[in-house]
Image (tube, rainbow, N blue to C red):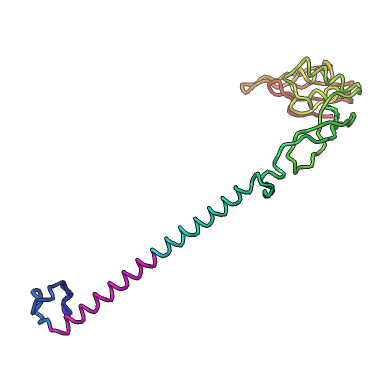
């Protein structure tokens, strides 16, 4: 067995009479202390190993007990002593009654409401479903015709035109659809583009200003 030299900590044989590195004599007490330390270390290592083994055995026993209970639960099926299956409560899709509210796609007014159905989770309370149509108002009917003729124009723009209104961001074609041709057009051409002033004297003396075909401001 190897022991540690008390002087230089060099590992030496317990049979040696002195340390070959530092020359310190090895006494009988040095050997006894080394044996006692080795025995203490061995016992600590053995105790740790036993503790780990006991922990592993405990895990195995608990797993076996859990599996036994699961088997008992399974064996009850078909005997009239089954446990209720609650795993899907509230998660199934069902068909429920739901109110359908129809609004005008242009003015936003409510047109009608009617009963309907919707497929939702069993635990969910259906909310009224919104749908859109075109009401009978003349402006909304006109906006719908404009939208059909110009599908690239937005719903809001078509409704604004149908009300004979203009707004910043409109193109010249959209302004023409809303107000018709102006009484006069003043055009300014620069290296940076073309600016125009449209004069509508019959509409309260309003002036519209365009940069590169898009309305950017107005004066009334």
Residue drawn at (30%, 73%) of the image: 43
On the image, the x and y values in percent for residue 187 come to 73, 18
Q: Which residues are magenta?
A: 27-52
Residue 36 higher or lower than 113, as above or below: below
Is 29 within the magenta?
Answer: yes
On the image, the x and y values in percent for residue 219 come to 81, 29
Is 58 within the magenta?
Answer: no
Residue drawn at (53%, 52%) of the image: 67
Q: Is residue 104 left or right of residue 124?
A: right
Work out whether residue 137 or residue 21 is closer to the camera in this orientation and state it: 21
Work out whether residue 45 or residue 212 is closer to the camera in this orientation and state it: 45
Give the total of numbered labels. 0
Q: Is residue 49 left or right of residue 29?
A: right
Magenta segment's dominant SS is helix
Q: Quadrant of the N terminus?
A: bottom left
On the image, the x and y values in percent for residue 205 come to 87, 25
Q: Is residue 76 left or right of residue 47?
A: right
On the image, the x and y values in percent for residue 156 come to 79, 27
Residue drawn at (41%, 65%) of the image: 54
Picture quadrant where residue 106 is located:
top right
Residue 218 higher or lower than 33, as above or below: above
Picture quadrant where residue 158 is located:
top right
Picture quadrant where residue 108 is located:
top right
Residue drawn at (34%, 66%) of the image: 49
């Amino acid at each position: 067995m190897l022991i540690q030299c008390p002087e230089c900590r060099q590992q030496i044989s317990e049979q040696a009479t002195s340390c070959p590195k530092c020359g310190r004599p090895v006494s009988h007490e040095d050997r006894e202390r080394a044996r006692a330390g080795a025995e203490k270390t061995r016992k600590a290592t053995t105790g740790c190993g036993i503790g780990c083994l006991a922990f592993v055995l405990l895990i195995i026993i608990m797993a076996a007990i859990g599996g036994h209970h699961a088997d008992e639960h399974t064996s009850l099926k078909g005997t009239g002593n089954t446990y209720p299956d609650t795993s899907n409560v509230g998660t199934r899709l069902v068909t429920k009654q739901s109110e359908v509210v129809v609004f005008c796609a242009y003015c936003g007014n409510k047109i009608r409401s009617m009963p309907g159905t919707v497929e939702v989770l069993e635990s969910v309370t259906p909310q009224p479903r919104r749908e859109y149509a075109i009401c009978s108002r003349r402006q909304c009917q006109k906006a719908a015709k404009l939208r059909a003729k110009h599908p690239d124009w937005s719903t809001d723009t078509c409704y604004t035109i149908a009300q004979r209104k203009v707004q910043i961001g409109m193109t010249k074609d959209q302004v023409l659809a809303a107000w018709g041709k102006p009484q006069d057009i003043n055009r300014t051409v620069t290296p940076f583009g073309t600016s125009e002033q449209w004069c509508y004297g019959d509409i309260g003396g309003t002036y519209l200003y365009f940069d590169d075909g898009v309305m950017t401001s107005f004066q009334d």
